[in-house]
Image (cartoon, grey):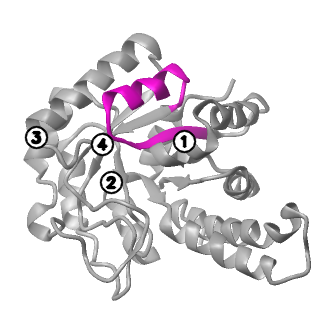
Amino acid sequence: MIKPLIECIKEAREKKVAIGHFNVSDSEGYNAVTAAAKELGVPVIVGVSEKERTFLGVAEIRALVTVAQERGDLVYLNADHTYSVEASREAVDNHYDAVIIDGAEKPFVENVMMTKEVVNYARAHHPTMLVEGELGFIGTGSTIRDEIPDGVSEETQTKPEDAKTFVDETCVDLFAPSVGNIHGLIKGGEPKLNIERVRAIAKAVSVPLVLHGASGNTDEEVAAAIEAGISVVHINTELRQAYKHGIEKGMSSDELAPYKFLAEGVEEMKELVLKKLKVFNRMQ
């Protein structure tokens, strides 16, 4: 058996590097992500949101990751952005390695209550599973936007004292704050990450921090965020963009076999994952 995910994250935290988290929507994307991590010899987290799980199959993607884990690959599965207790329980029951219960758009007290409920359920039914909570809205959806989404601003970034209260009351294993990060890509350029806020939150809470919405942020900013206390970094939109671009090139050929015209997309995804993992693991 491979070591638990929390051990990989603790090791990353001690080394001031980060575990890469990459969302996939099909087996081709899964192959691209895991091949890149294996090439570099680093652990990786495969993320599947509620809609991605519906498309792939909740149990089916678990089976793919189980095969990799049984042969010793450091590949882990996260039920990304799960918006209800019921959907979170489904991930627990299917023995995912982690789940994020996302109540960021809800009032603080409601967010705490639903997060705590998921933590208690996971502890009772799958004790080694990690539960992540989120506080501070960063927008939703993996899209290319004209401007920063409503409700996302410096004023609404997570406050260190609120982060501490949230973590203490919910007993989550991982915590995702709002620190200038935004889901999707902004055409005019991403706002800068608030590195000092990352550092302050890292000092305020005892659990590892997760950076969502890192697509579009510069390598330098992400590296600074990791140095300040981020232990897991999420990439999705850039990955989808690379996959689509590669598939378009493959479709322009005369190839009819899917595994041939999809290969361009897989290769572009893999190259992007390699690039990101080198940044996250200080390999450049």
Crowd class of label 1 (few under 14; some 14 to 19; many from 20; radius 10 Å): many
122 versus 24 height, above or below: above
The numbered mark at residue 83 is none
Q: Where is residue 281 in the image (x, y as percent from the top left)?
A: 55, 59
Crowd class of label 2 (few under 14; some 14 to 19; many from 20; radius 10 Å): many
Which residue is label 4 attached to? 102
Q: Position of residue 237 (x, y in %)?
A: 49, 67
Q: Which residue is found at the position 13% from the left and 50% from the top? A: 160
| Residues at circles 1 and 2 in contact by the CB criterion of under 8 Å | no
Please report the bounds of the magenta region as a residue range. Answer: 76-97
Q: Which of marks 1 and 3 is in front?
A: 1
Q: Which of marks 2 and 3 is in front?
A: 3
Label count reads: 4
Residue placed most toward the observer, 42 or 85:
85
Element marked by disc 2: loop
Residue 245 position by quadrant:
bottom right
